[in-house]
Amino acid sequence: MALPKTRHSKARGRKRRTHYKSQNVSYMACPQCGDTKMPHHACPNCGYYRGRPVISAAE
């Protein structure tokens, strides 16, 4: 396995890691109730997913 001859500074390693950023979370409007929800998830407000009730609505 290859080993570095000299140590890389902390700044050099941090410069390389500047591109490892988390993405923004996207939201969409629920077609059933109009509340915001994450795509491909059941709506936490009404409990519907793809036009069908899948979980009991939060009261």
Image: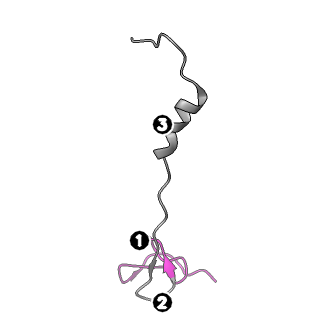
**Residue drawn at (45%, 69%) of the image:** 26
Tag 1 secondary structure: loop
Residue type highlighted by circle 2:
Cys
Position of residue 14 measured from the top left corner of the image (x, y, whole percent)? 55, 36
Name the residue rendered at 49%, 50% in the picture.
Answer: 21
Q: CA distance from mark 1 to mark 2?
A: 14 Å
Residue at image x 39%, y 12%? 2
Left or right: residue 9 versus residue 42 is: right
Q: Is residue 17 above or below residue 43?
A: above
Q: Which residue is mark 3?
A: 16
Of residues 49 and 15, the one drawn nearer to the viewer in this rendering: 15
Residue indicated by mark 2: 33
Quadrant in the picture for residue 7: top right
Assess whether residue 53 is covered by the magenta stretch: yes
The mark closer to the camera, 1 or 3, is: 3
What amino acid does circle 3 point to? Answer: Arg
Mark 1 / mark 2, whichever is N-terminal = 2
Neighbor class of circle 1 (other Cα within 10 Å; few <14, some 14-19, many 20+) is some
Asked if residue 29 is positioned above or below residue 21 in the image, the reply reads below
Magenta stretch: give its range: 36-59
What label sits on residue 39 in the rendered view?
Answer: 1
